[in-house]
């Protein structure tokens, strides 16, 4: 599948403007620091850009802010599409990552086992 250039540019922009929670989680997952698994951030997948992905485990991690309270139907459609493509999607709220990153990392670990 070819990725459209504007889509790639949007992914780059999202990487540069990540939230504090995304940056904290990325700090723990980048550079194969987490169980020697390679994660990517703001990765285009089909019609979506996912926050974090491990292709090896087919695991997508979404870090959601308050705007996702209003977009639950869109998030459900997005998750169903990604699941149909063979990915498992887990979601964390920004405050979960910022206030309890140890538990978040433990949950990610369980999904990777």
Image (spheres, grey):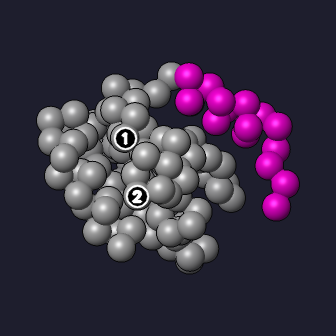
Question: Quick check: can you spot residue 84?
Answer: yes
Q: Earlier in the sequence, mark 1 or mark 2?
A: 1
In x, y percent, where is residue 31? Answer: 52, 42
Give SS at disc 1: helix
- As rendered, which of 91 and 37 lies closer to the eye? 37
Helix, strand or loop: magenta stretch? helix
Report the disc number at residue 81.
Answer: none
- Residue 35 falls in image quadrant: bottom left
Rendered residue at 42%/38% (across/down)? 26
Q: Is residue 52 above or below residue 23?
A: below
Rendered residue at 34%/32% (across/down)? 24
Q: Mark 1: few, some, or many residues within 10 Å (few <14, many ≥20)?
A: few
Magenta residues? 1-16
Give SS at disc 2: loop
In x, y percent, where is residue 5? Answer: 82, 37
Q: Is residue 72 above or below residue 41?
A: below
- Residue 42 falls in image quadrant: top right
Q: Quarter of the image containing the C terminus?
A: bottom left
| Residue 46 located left or right of residue 110 | right
Q: Which residue is mark 1?
A: 28
In x, y percent, where is residue 17? Answer: 51, 22
Report the disc number at residue 35.
Answer: 2
The Cα atoms of the two marked residues, 1 and 2, are separated by 10 Å
Rendered residue at 40%/34% (across/down)? 27
| Residue 91 located left or right of residue 10 | left
Question: Quick check: can you spot residue 51?
Answer: no
Q: Is residue 27 above or below residue 3?
A: above
Rendered residue at 15%/35% (across/down)? 99
Q: Nearer the viewer, mark 1 or mark 2?
A: 2
């Amino acid at each position: 599948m070819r990725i459209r250039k504007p889509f790639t540019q949007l992914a780059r922009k999202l990487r540069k403007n990540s939230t504090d929670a995304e940056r904290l989680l990325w700090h723990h997952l980048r550079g194969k620091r987490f169980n020697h698994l390679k994660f990517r951030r703001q990765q285009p997948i089909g019609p979506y850009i996912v926050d974090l992905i491990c292709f090896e485990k087919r695991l997508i991690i979404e870090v959601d802010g308050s705007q996702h309270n209003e977009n639950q139907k869109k998030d459900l459609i997005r998750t169903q599409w990604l699941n149909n493509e063979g990915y498992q999607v887990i979601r964390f709220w920004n405050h979960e990552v910022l206030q309890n990153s140890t538990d978040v990392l433990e949950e990610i670990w369980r999904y990777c086992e």
